[in-house]
């Protein structure tokens, strides 16, 4: 599998995941022109996308969804509990509600990983064919059930949003600070490192830290914190807001 992370952070999130047989866009947080421009840098077009997966309905994850679907007529797979919100911007003809925890499309198995975030029916995804990738961001914590599903996968694209000290000493209003650190907020660097320590295994080849806060984190701090906790030879990289990252397993 190959992941081309188009960008990750509070200004927009989108990842093109290339499996053995499918091209899947996870979230559409950038405008159609920007998404098209980035894809074309890597010799792909929006029309190449087989289908779209959406994690939740916050703007930084769906800003370009309506335009992309309108132009390219692509199906959007969402948890059934998200249907009403996404149907406000996407015609029902293109919405494919997922009614169980697992979805199988040809040789690809997709497992929903319910997240704890202030958005209805928010999820992460485990995608598996001959390889496996976990994609999980925007969650205040990761449940024990999810951790069991996430054990020993080839690639993890996982939120490492903030450093708690930077957050609490920083410029955010108190209410927003409480939202970020709360159970329906975002994972800190320390939490991400501790979760990964529980689940990485011999098959794990790549870890990408995603959705880093530009105000309450730095790439260097996130990488150091997680690396120190894991103490592993597995490659750990940080996704960026303004440039792409390509990861292959």
Image: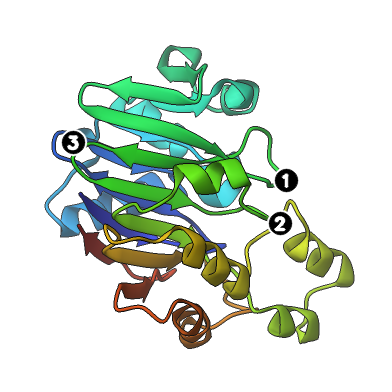
**Of pointers 2 and 3, the one earlier in the residue sequence:** 3
Q: Residue at x 28, y 61 (%)?
A: 202
Q: Residue at x 18, y 53 (%)?
A: 40
Residue 180 in picture, x, y percent from top left: 73, 63
Q: Indicate which disc residue 185 carries.
A: 2
Q: Residue at x 75, y 84 (%)?
A: 170
Q: Residue furthest top?
A: 93
CB under 8 Å between discs 3 and 1: no
Say few, some or many: other residues with alpha carbon within 10 Å of mark 2 (under 14 / 14 to 19 / 20 or more).
many
Residue 70 in picture, x, y percent from top left: 38, 27
Say few, some or many: other residues with alpha carbon within 10 Å of mark 3 (under 14 / 14 to 19 / 20 or more).
some
47 relative to 13 in the view: left or right? left
Report the residue marked by disc 1: 118
CB under 8 Å between discs 1 and 2: yes
Helix, strand or loop under label 3: helix
Q: Is residue 220 visible?
A: yes
**Of pointers 1 and 2, the one earlier in the residue sequence:** 1
């Amino acid at each position: 599998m190959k992941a081309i992370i188009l960008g990750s952070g509070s200004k927009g999130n989108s990842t093109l995941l290339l499996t053995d047989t499918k091209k899947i866009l996870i979230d559409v947080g950038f405008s159609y022109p920007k998404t098209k421009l980035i894809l074309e840098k890597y010799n792909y077009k929006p029309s190449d996308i087989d289908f779209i997966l959406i994690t939740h309905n916050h703007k930084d994850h769906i800003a370009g969804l309506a335009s992309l679907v309108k132009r390219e007529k692509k199906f959007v797979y969402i948890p059934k509990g998200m249907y009403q919100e996404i149907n406000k911007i996407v015609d029902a003809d293109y919405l494919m509600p997922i009614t169980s925890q697992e979805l199988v499309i040809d040789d690809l198995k997709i497992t929903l990983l319910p997240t704890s975030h202030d958005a209805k029916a928010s999820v992460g995804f485990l995608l598996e064919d001959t390889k496996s990738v976990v994609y999980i961001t925007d969650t205040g914590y990761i449940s024990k059930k999810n951790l069991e599903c996430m054990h020993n996968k080839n690639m993890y694209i996982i939120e490492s949003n903030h450093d708690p000290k930077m957050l609490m000493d920083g410029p955010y209003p108190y209410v927003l600070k409480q939202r970020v650190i709360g159970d329906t907020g975002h994972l800190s660097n320390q939490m991400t490192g501790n979760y990964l320590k529980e689940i990485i295994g011999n098959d794990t080849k790549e870890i990408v830290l995603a959705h880093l806060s530009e105000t309450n984190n730095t790439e260097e701090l996130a990488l150091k914190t997680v690396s120190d906790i894991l103490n592993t030879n597995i490659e750990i990289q940080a996704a960026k807001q303004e440039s792409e990252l390509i990861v292959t397993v």
